[in-house]
Amino acid sequence: MYQRENNELSVSGVSIGYTRSGNGTGEIFSNISASAGKGELVALFGKNGIGKSTLLRSIIRLQKPLKGKVFLSGKEISEYPPNELARKVSFVSTEPVKVNNMGVRDMVAFGRFPYTNWMGRMGAKDSLLIERAISMVGLNSLAHKNINNISDGERQRVMIARTLAQDTPVIVLDEPTAFLDLPNKYEIVHLLGRLASENNKTVVFSTHDLNIAIQEADKVWLMLDDKLIEGAPEDLVLDRSFGQIFSDSKLTFNDDKGEFRIAKSPSAEIALEGEGKEYFWTSKALERLEFKVVNDPNIPMKVVIDKKEGEKKWKLLTNQNQISFDSLYCLCSYLKSLKLS
Amino acid sequence: MYTGRKNKNILLFSSLAILTVVLFLLSVFTGSVTIPVKEILKIAAGGEPLRPEWGTIVLDMRIPKAVTALLAGMALSASGLQMQTIFRNPLAGPFVLGISAGASLGVALVVMGFAGFFAGAHIGGNWLVIAAAWLGSGTVLFIILLVSVRVRDIMTILILGIMFGSAATAIVSILQYFSEEAMLKSYVIWTMGSLGNVSKAELQVLSYGIAGGLAISLLSAKTLNAMLLGENYAKTLGVNIPRARFTVFFSTSLLAGSITAFCGPIGFIGIAVPHVARMITKNADHRILMPATLLLGGSVMLLSDVISRLPGHEGTLPINSVTALIGIPVVIWIVIRNQKFSNIV
């Protein structure tokens, strides 16, 4: 059977947490083993407070793991002196960095920090790598701007460009999409995927946006309550692992659609007649109102979608009467008022 | 970096250097005794002046005082900049670590506490007071360094520094309460700061300390740049955090501690000057910001010295009041002009 070799990054039997003076250790998560190969985009997923940030911090040596080892390019990370480690792994944190009087290019230039002399003098190679990093993330037009005068999405790109200028085989990002709107979330994750495959880098990032991560990541590290499991996102859908993340909440994972839903308990049944997109979204609206949509003509309440010459109408048929609505919003308001009375 | 910026920097640094030289000369040429410019030039060139006492005034008083002002301005501004950067806090200054409070406690103990043993000890230009101030600030530094190796969050150090400072101030108050009027007055005068009590021999010692401290600050420019991003980012860029903290705290104590020991606690310059330097350089890079801060700090202190002399009047105003009165309008102007004061660092 095929087995991928040469892990660029591997975590072996690591326990994470904080050492407390006096009463022993505050272990958050124990015995984590996971790996990532060259050119792979890895999404770290798990619920709030489970220890995603702490795991990432342990990987880049911002804190020491309580137990276990982290290997980077075949060597244990504690064996790297600080300056050498900075040439192996770069990092983007959740907190947005705001510094007055600092240009975009200046921020990207920080990537060359581990390579320059005590004065920070840049050579031709440094300048080349900085310019290349800026154009790789599509920031050419903003390069002269001040870091405080650009949007959050743009600033996140600047921080990513900085890791590219740092020229490390591994890049670790802690919730790079946390402060972004939906299009920016997609673009940043897509950018990370492109950087991983085009530049043969190992990119590990934590996120809450599973729907986006599933579409781009080569691998998912999934932190469940007591263990971390890893695999292609599709593997984890097939073996029903995703559903276990929020097992203690009302959220359920829909294996067919690959998304989370709030589990609702339908209180009444309703029949629906129609076709196409309209049928799909009408049934969604009815489910939102906690109706169970069934295809049974004997049900006393029925919605019929009437589509004529580009005009849409919804008819609600009950035993007593028939009312028609020209939008789903009106239909829903009426149904809601019925339920209340 | 880019030619446009480079030319602007050359212009900026030449203007600052000229400003410093002009203010230095102004400080030497003015004073309560009027000496003709020609005579001062003659004295500086090693010639005999018309009146012998003029030689003494210029060589033993005015020049040492101007040099002291220059050193004090540079030292306090440089340590203020370092503190603002390492704590990422616009209100940090040279004394947030409790250095001046430690020095004050040392001096208070000598002047008011053990006054019986040293009756007649002349305050200010006195090695005993200097040693006490140095010992006081050195002790605070030692505690801060011990803590900084163990503590993960740098804000803890800031809070501890403020706590040490308050504790020292409390002890000083108790000493003041129980001390006699004459001693109390000598202590209060010490706290008002003075540039004029540094003798030539003392100035030599002071300048070694300041030169050492300034050299360390200039060499730390690259590390300080990384610290602007916060310690986490600095660490992932390869900065050795404990070593960086040690270096910065050490140079700050050397600079601020020495000036406090020789001139008393001089406030405000250390907080205000780095902000002005940021505004005029429009640059966050400490390789530009640090030298600009040094020149600007020296100039401001020389200007304060000139103002404190009140032309045509015997004696001088307390330097501490002058620096505050010059500094406050500047800071208010910056706050109002620049709404983003909170993330100015």
Image (cartoon, grey):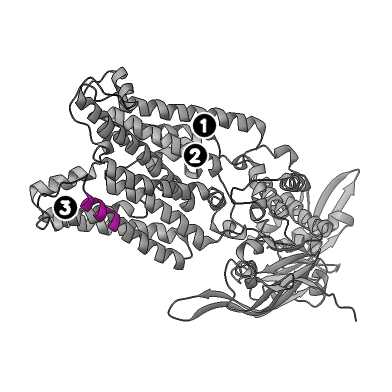
Instruction: Look at label 2 and name its amino acid.
Output: Pro
Q: Secondary structure at mark 2?
A: helix
Residue drawn 70% across the image and 78% down it? A33
Residue drawn 35% across the image and 32% down it? B302
Q: Are marks 3 and 2 on the same chain?
A: yes
Q: Secondary structure at mark 1?
A: helix
Residue B186 in picture, x, y percent from top left: 15, 45
Residue A81 highlighted magenta (yes or no): no
Q: Does residue B279 appear in this view?
A: yes
Mark 2 burial class by Cα count in 10 Å: few <14, some 14-19, many 20+: many
Instruction: Look at label 3 and name its amino acid.
Output: Val
Left or right: residue B48 versus residue A140 is left
Label drawn at residue B13: 1
Residue A131 in picture, x, y percent from top left: 74, 44
Return the disc, 3 or 1, that comes first in the chain's sequence: 1
**Frontmost residue, A192 versus B326:** B326
Q: Are marks 3 and 1 on the same chain?
A: yes
Quarter location, residue A55 = bottom right
- The residue identified by callout 3 is B111
Return the disc, 2 or 1, that comes first in the chain's sequence: 1
Span shown in magenta: B122-135
Give the letter of the chain under mark 3.
B
How far is the residue under mark 3 from the one under mark 2?
Answer: 37 Å
- Magenta: main secondary structure equals helix
- The residue identified by callout 2 is B291
Residue drawn 61% across the image and 64% down it? A82
Q: Does residue A330 appear in this view?
A: no
Residue B130 highlighted magenta (yes or no): yes
**Frontmost residue, A106 versus A313:** A106
How far is the residue under mark 3 from the one under mark 1?
Answer: 43 Å
Do the residues bearing badges 2 and 1 touch, measured as CB atoms within 8 Å? yes
